[in-house]
Image: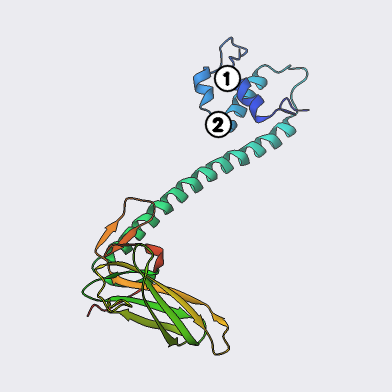
Amino acid sequence: MSFLSGLTTSTLSAAASTSSTTSSGTTSSSDSDSSTSSTYETYMTLLLTQLQNQNPTDPEDTSEITTQLATFEQLNLAEQNNSLLTDLSSSLQSLQGVVENSAAQSYLGTDIVALGDSAPLEDGEAEWYFVLEDAAASVNLSVSDEDGNVVYQTTTTGDEGSNNFVWDGTQSDGSVATSGVYTLSVTATDSDGASVNSQTLMTGVVSALDLTGDDAVLYVNGVDVDLDDVQGTQTVS
């Protein structure tokens, strides 16, 4: 049986950190050196020490030693591959960050369409899109201010797919709303009164960027928009 049979990684590490005397009376590398050596290097150190001190009349089984050498060589290669994969993953993450930041910068000054129910009222106009899963016979649109107060409501119909809604800032009582950020709520039903799934999109010009976090954030006139939520762009009139 080989001298390494039954030894664990922790055993190898512990053995490598102690001083070993060779046949010539020299000692092995210091504890600080062995602490930084790999499992493969530790194995080789122990193997050479054992071979130097083996009983000439009862030598180690070279065939088993050769098999274990091949096994530890595979372990060494696996450790190197894991290190390379870790470095590659880190590089890809850095590259992804660069690509995302570049994409975010390309939106600066652009009128975008993004997932979200909040939109700014500027120059007497706030604009949203709502996407319906099916055609709707009745679509209730409700606009709320930043305090959650409903300031405007209307009912219309909607086509399957994208529908546009522009609010001119006129409130239900006839007064004109002040500039700020407003939220649109959409409730749609078909001709049978069954609910129709909807998704709300906001639109606006990207006026600033925040690239300091893990994900790029676009500022659309007071509204924060994640880069992943951008659905497209439109021409500024």
In the foreground, 141 or 217 = 141
Residue at 53% in and 24% down? 35
Could you tell whether 150 is left or right of 105 in the image? right
Residue at 70% across / 31% down in the picture?
65
Quadrant (top left/top right/bottom left/bottom right) for the N terminus: top right
Q: Secondary structure at mark 2?
A: loop
Q: Disc 1 marks which amino acid?
A: Ser
Q: Earlier in the sequence, mark 1 or mark 2?
A: 1
Locate residue 211 relative to residue 10 in the image: left or right: left
Give the number of the disc on residue 38: 2
Q: Is residue 15 above or below residue 94?
A: above
The residue where tag 1 is placed is 17
Q: Position of residue 162 (x, y in %)?
A: 42, 82
> Residue 135 placed where, x, y %?
50, 87
Q: Secondary structure at mark 1?
A: loop
Q: How many marks?
A: 2
Disc 2 crowd, CA 10 A, few/some/many (<14, 14-19, 20+): few
Looking at the rendered structure, the kind of residue marked 2 is Ser
Q: Residue furthest top?
A: 25
User: What residue lies at 59% left-to-right and 31% top-to-bottom?
Assistant: 39
Question: Would residue 148 appear left or right of 5 to someone viewing this image?
Answer: left
Q: Quadrant of residue 28?
A: top right
Q: Position of residue 226 (x, y in %)?
A: 38, 61
* 54 or 95, nearer to the observer: 95
Rendered view: 152 above or below 217: below
Query: Picture coordinates of residue 170 (x, y %)?
Result: 28, 78
CA neighbours of label 1 inside 10 A, class few (<14), some (14 to 19), many (20+): some
Residue 231 visible to an observer of this rendering: no
The answer to whether residue 89 is above or below residue 176 is above
